């Protein structure tokens, strides 16, 4: 029986990771990253797919790239303090690409009733606080920034000041770790755990990712929809997805989507981090 998902990734030795097989087109490709190259084999059903259908693929790619990055850092003797039970980053702004925002809606809708109610309430409560507190220009007395990097930096600093816990954080643990956002997967620091806790004047150093799957997925979505690049704050994702539900239902040929996604990923791998 074929899984409903139109896209899957094969693991090592050809083992399937999603129980999906039969009547598929296969894509073999490599991403040349520090510690790599990393080889991937993707099976794609020859039928239409939605943007959120690409998210499981993106998560798997991101997880593999993260493991290679971690192994490379450890071989160099670099300390990576990121550990289970450390919620130091869980009040940071988490941007979701458009496909992730739609997938977030799907994932939350599939939760048991009690979990669905808890996560939804947490999201809507945080969204209310965000919308009430958002400044007009994020720049104080300075002119409003026009470049994306500066604006994102100021927005991130403002958001961190709100100290809003992630909707999935419970007793210091992520209750949705396997389906956590790409931004969380790609956020890796070096230094000490004490620095992450704010002890001392220095800050942990964020590891630049050679290939940001988050950015590549966002670029793909913008190209397919012929729109501007968009990102949605995690707590705002549920109401945003509800307002854009018709967009989530649009489809494209799955093979064409994956082929273009691979091209974007490979182009990113050629750009120095």
Image: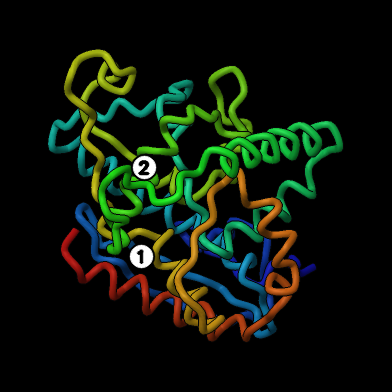
Q: Residue at x 37, y 79 (%)?
A: 263
Relative vertical location of residue 49 with respect to residue 272 in this rendering, above or below: below
Mark linked to residue 107:
none
Q: Earlier in the sequence, mark 2 or mark 1?
A: 1
Residue 2 position within the rendered picture, expressed as x and y whole percent measured from the top left: 75, 69
Cα distance between the residues tagged 2 and 1: 22 Å
Quadrant of residue 195 in the image? Answer: top left
In the image, 270 versus 143, the foreground residue is: 143
In the image, 221 versus 237, the foreground residue is: 237
Q: Residue at x 58, y 67 (%)?
A: 54
Quadrant into which the N terminus falls: bottom right
Can you name the residue that lies furthest to the left here?
76
- Image check: 135 left or right of 45? left
- The colour scheme used to paint the residues is rainbow
Can you name the residue that lies furthest to the right here?
113
Relative vertical location of residue 66 with respect to residue 267 in this rendering, above or below: above
Residue 221 position within the rendered picture, expressed as x and y whole percent measured from the top left: 52, 73
Q: Assess disc 1: are there few (<14), some (14-19) or many (≥20) residues with their C-alpha within 10 Å of its C-alpha.
A: some
Q: Which residue is mark 1?
A: 39
SS of the residue under disc 2: loop
Residue 181 position within the rendered picture, expressed as x and y whole percent measured from the top left: 52, 48
Quadrant of residue 251 in the image? Answer: bottom right
Q: Assess disc 2: are there few (<14), some (14-19) or many (≥20) residues with their C-alpha within 10 Å of its C-alpha.
A: some
In the image, 265 versus 123, the foreground residue is: 123
Mark linked to residue 187:
2
């Amino acid at each position: 029986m074929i899984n409903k998902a139109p896209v899957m990734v094969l693991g090592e030795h050809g083992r399937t990771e999603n129980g999906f097989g039969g009547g598929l087109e296969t894509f073999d490709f490599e991403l040349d990253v520090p510690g790599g190259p990393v080889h991937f084999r993707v099976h794609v059903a020859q039928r239409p797919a939605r943007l959120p259908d690409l998210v499981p693929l993106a998560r798997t790619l991101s997880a593999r790239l993260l493991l290679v990055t971690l192994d490379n850092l450890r071989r160099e003797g670099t300390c990576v303090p990121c550990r289970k039970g450390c919620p130091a980053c869980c009040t940071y702004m988490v941007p979701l690409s458009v496909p992730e925002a739609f997938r977030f809606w799907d994932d939350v809708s599939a939760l048991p009733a009690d979990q669905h109610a808890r996560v939804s309430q947490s999201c809507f409560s945080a969204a209310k606080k965000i919308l009430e507190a958002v400044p007009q220009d994020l720049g104080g007395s300075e002119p409003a920034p026009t470049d994306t990097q500066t604006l994102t930096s100021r927005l991130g600093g403002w958001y961190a000041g709100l100290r809003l816990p992630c909707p999935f954080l419970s007793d210091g643990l992520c209750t949705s770790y396997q389906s956590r956002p790409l931004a969380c997967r790609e956020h890796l620091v070096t230094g000490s755990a004490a620095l992450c806790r704010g002890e001392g004047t220095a800050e942990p150093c964020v590891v630049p990712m050679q290939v940001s799957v988050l950015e590549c997925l966002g670029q793909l979505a913008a190209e397919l929809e012929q729109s501007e690049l968009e990102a949605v704050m995690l707590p705002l994702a549920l109401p945003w997805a509800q307002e854009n539900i018709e967009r989530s239902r649009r489809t494209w040929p799955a093979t064409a989507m994956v082929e273009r996604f691979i091209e974007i990923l490979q182009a990113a791998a050629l750009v120095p981090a």
